[in-house]
Amino acid sequence: MTKTFEETTSAIQGSKNESLITANQADDDSNYSSVIIIGSGISGVKCAVDLTNKNIDVRMLEAQDHVGGRLKTYRDDEGRHYDLGASWLHDTLQNELFEHAIDLGCKLYYDDGDWGWYTNQGERIPNSLKAQRVVFDAEHKIQLAYEDLTLPDKSLKEFTEEFVQTHPLITEEQKVLAPQMMRYLELWHAIPWDRVSAKYGIPEHFGRDAFVTSGYDKIFTSVYEQIDRTNLKLHLNSEVINISRANDKERLYTVKTKSGETYTSKYVLVTIPAGALKYTHQDLFAPNLLPKPLETVIHEMELAALGKFVLEFESVFWPEDLDNMVSLGNDALKSLTPGAHPLVFTNGKPLFGRNCLLALTSPPLTHYLEANPDKVYDFFEPALKGFRVDKSKPLPKMTFLLATDWTQNKYFRASYSALLVGQDYYNNILPFIDGADRLRFAGEHTTHDANGCVQGAYATGRREAEYILADMKGDALPYKIRESLENVNLNGK
């Protein structure tokens, strides 16, 4: 029996014991569908919306017991609602999901007010040192340098350290602080700064970032609800383990699941996250099914690990006029010791009306803390002590902790894709866009625009629906898609 929309969408919401509704399999009198979509994140759902509303029959196979992918909102009976996946709507000047959220009446908040910067010893860095101005200059220098795309790439670490040592009028204090402050970008790219590409490492934003305070599940659910359910067969708990050619002459594909089911289709859209493609599903594709460039990209692509931790306390002890607080790392300290890695804490009081902080981490700390959530407070405590407005008072009791587990979940293995020093978006993305005949790919890792973001993934779902519909008519849309990417300024501008 097909699961009702209400049952299915409610399953993207966690609970205080993480019990999620288990789905029944869809009614099925045939193993054939015109299109099979693997994964039920925002890219797969958007593709399903566009196809089913054109009267195309779609089968969606989801490995987990709920839809939503990396959009996952925790809700409990005490009124908490925290997003374990995406929390922000980025680039709000050109983000259609932002406009959609406004129309839905979602509660949003621009958390881009004042920032507080602290050393790893808990000392607040005074604005009078002007260290952040040096960071801004270093970012601008990187952007100017890589207007020449032929310039050899460097890591963000190497470029920044060279800049502070060679640029005039930088004080000794700034030479120490500015590089560690630049490491805030580790909490954007979610890889260590000695692996971040300087060429592509400075984000260029098109508008402010809005925090979704009412829960991202409302946005996802509204998109999911647009699917024409009469043309969709949804299967949860259906992990795909093999994709192969069923019939070369008719260009059909066979898709096999771990539970032993076999399905065939003319088109297969793979929206499996980059981390799972690289590590969990190494034998997913039959030999010689993928072009060599695509095999290479899947094998070599870098994975980001952004950890997210929600901490609630008996009372607020940090400066309430700050939207964000950064605790700097220290390269001289041994890895995986408190104070070695940069941390960003977002003030949750204006977001949720609760005495909470939202902490972000980068690897390798993310991997360690997601595997050992009982160690979270120990690692954060030095930073938290530094945030105290009244240093004479002890920290209030922590009353609640929520941690992500994306790196530990075999269906994800990471939070999103990333770009290493020496790699470029063109080589990493075009193989996914080209696909393998009617075997297509979508997701945040398959786009240059808004790479790693929800709106980027959403757009790829639309892109692949357009491809499939055009290919069914014999149009040459795939080449138009490729040409549009080739004309993009690949420096991210």
Image (cartoon, grey):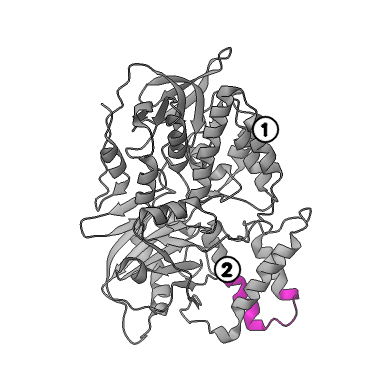
Tell me the quarter of the picture where residue 438 sits: top right
Query: What kind of secondary structure does the magenta stretch mostly adopt?
Result: helix
**Marked residue nearer the N-terminal end (1 or 2):** 2
Residue 207's place in the image compared with 20, above or below, is below
Which is nearer the eye, 374 or 453?
453
For the C terminus, the quadrant is bottom right
Tell me the residue at 55%/13% (across/down). 250
- Residue 175 belongs to magenta span: yes
- Taking 81 as reference, is 31 left or right? right
Residue type marked 2: Asp
Please report contact status of discs 1 and 2: CB closer than 8 Å, yes or no: no
Tell me the residue at 55%/57% (across/down). 189
- Residue 306 belongs to magenta span: no
For the N terminus, the quadrant is top left
User: Residue 47, position in %: x, y?
Assistant: 47, 36
Tell me the residue at 34%/33% (across/down). 236
User: Residue 67, position in %: x, y?
Assistant: 36, 40
Farthest residue, direction top: 249
Residue type marked 1: Tyr
- Disc 2 crowd rating (10 Å Cα; few below 14, some 14-19, many 20+) is few
| Residue span colored magenta | 165-183
Residue underneath mark 2: 331
Q: In terms of secondary structure, where does tag 2 sit?
A: loop
Residue underneath mark 1: 479
Residue 230's place in the image compared with 13, above or below, is above
Q: In terms of secondary structure, where does tag 1 sit?
A: helix
Residue 377's place in the image compared with 56, above or below, is below
- Taking 456 as reference, is 42 left or right? left
Which is nearer the eye, 299 or 26?
26
